Amino acid sequence: MDNIEISYNDIIEWLENYYKGREKVATYRGLEYSREFATDVEAAREEGTEFFIDPMLPIDLVMVQTRQEPSGEDPDKLIDVHYYTLFWLVSPDDTSTERRLQFYRFYLSRISPLKAVQVVMVIPVGIKGELEQSLRVIAKENGFGLWKIETSNEEPEKLYTPKDFLRRMEDDFKNPPEPPEKMEHFEPSITDKAPEISLFFDRYVREAVEALAGVTARKIGKRYIERKLLDAVFELQNISYTEKLKKLVTKHLMDKDDDYEFVTNTFSALWLECGLGMNYSDFLKVFEPPLYNIFAEQERPYRDHYFHQFHVFLLGLYIIDKLRTRFPDDIDRLWLITSSFHDMAYPLQLYDSWSKKFFDTSLGIPGVGESDMKSYFVEGSLLSSMGYIISALCKSHFNEELRGNWLQKEKPLVSFFHDIITKRKHHCVLSCLFLLKQAQSSNSDLMDTLFVPSTLAIALHHEVVWKSLPAERQLQSLRFCNDPLSFLLIFCDSVQEWGRPKANEESGGGAGDEIFILDEYEVTDSGCSVTIKTPYLSTTHDKFKEKEKELKNLEGFLQSSSEVLFKIILKDTSGAIREYPMRGPS
């Protein structure tokens, strides 16, 4: 098992190199990155296909070969036809391999010709015995390819050659499989027409596929986690828990298991690995799902914060790894705590706003819950927890150590946070209190070194706080050199727009509904640049302008160091770009 885990990324890179340089052949780590696949999807849309393939399927590698063939409408006209080979690294623990691969091949054939999709199962050369024998049976019965790969060799060991679905139908028609399948053997006069007969049945296969594909996104193993960032984990060199994270990512990519479980399991395992003295909370995982239903009919439906935290973590981790010397010594653990907890209390904020509206509309009772929070502010130790945040804020950004009766001196700040907690119940500060109260009861030894700096970053990560601080403690800018942890969280939180399911996803939404997707990112000794693009919107669209406004505010607040310039780039559907360098106040 260990050599399988270690070899996952090596095998993917080997396959990419195997096809590198071949004419009209391209490889992609997932369908969502294939330009050819996007072309086929668009062609299907123009032809009136009502059901569209979700590109976020868990495929390890896609090889696309483009051939020129006569057009069906005009035989004298040549058109590009794309042929897809889907490579699937087989996990020894996956008992549903056969069923899932059958489904994905039929599913993809909904928009591409049945002759254009074939599947190859891939195993490391070390797999033998019963597992190899069972995979041989699966390959033979389903027309899947089966390759063994030794990364030190130039060629794979091709145990079975893949067949596209149409070729498999033709071959089975001419030479039916042996029992227990009971198929009629036909005379040569009939079997000679196998291709034509197979094409006749194509329409019925497509109808069956469309019916099968009515299952929800989670049931078919849809990916929400950005593959580029998962792949980037294998590049990490300067993170203390790199090996543990690599093993967790490898197992997830091999097993193609549920993304929701993977996120919580990964954070939980890393918190344990880092010796934080307490378990990672599954609060957001448990309480976020109801928000999709509660806010489904709103003008702005609820969108994900569960995968969002994980994406923020992965992006920030990559930046830290490349700029390791620019961050404090314990940044690995600080970033894990901060990124994985920064939106933990989001359900509390939204549920509070919904419940207030509910009671006010139905019973005429405004402000439900506010008086309870005010009474608990002192009795429930919220004041003492808030004290940590205020003290850290003054020390990091105003160069002041609070002493003596600082509660009186900092009365405006106390009033501000009291209002944020009791009236607004804003998630960034509630997440801080959530984390601090857990830390106080579990591991107080790490309060000053880990949990207090993390909660300061969490408290500042939303403009409701950093733009609204009282006049006596206004933050004109947040400088990277003063507080790199808060800087990084605000930067990553603002740029992270991809892979965030919304309320309508289970009823037909999905990747096509995403406003922005991750295009590319680059980190060097002198700069960090992240580009997000929108597949459908122009720069004049309201949603594009809304993001522009947010980033304009951000570039006037965040101030990069003199050595490293942080920058966010927006790209619209035409390729037009807007750049937002984090230079601070002009």
Image: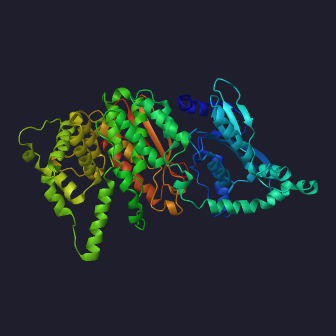
- Rendered location of residue 175, percent (x, y): 84, 49
- Vertical relation: 480 (above or below) 66: above
Quick one: quadrant of the C terminus? top left
Residue 65 at x, y = what percent? 72, 42
In the image, residue 567 sits, relative to residue 383, either above or below, namely above
Q: Is residue 559 visible?
A: no
Q: Relative to residue 574, is residue 451 depicted above or below?
A: above
Choose between 196 and 177: the one closer to the eye. Answer: 177
Image coordinates of residue 456 in percent, x first then y, are 25, 42
Q: Residue at x 41, y 64 (%)?
A: 293
Viewer can see residue 23: yes
Which is nearer the eye, 454 or 411? 454
Q: Position of residue 440 (x, y in %)?
A: 21, 41
In the figure, is residue 165 to the left or right of 246?
Answer: right
Give whichever of 322, 99 is nearer the camera. 99
- The residue located at (6%, 42%) in the rendering is 405
Number of callouts in the render? 0
Quadrant location of the N terminus? top right
Render colour scheme:
rainbow
Q: Is residue 252 above or below residue 180?
A: above
Compared across the picture, whether 575 is left or right of 297 comes to right
Q: Nearer the viewer, residue 579 or 83?
A: 83
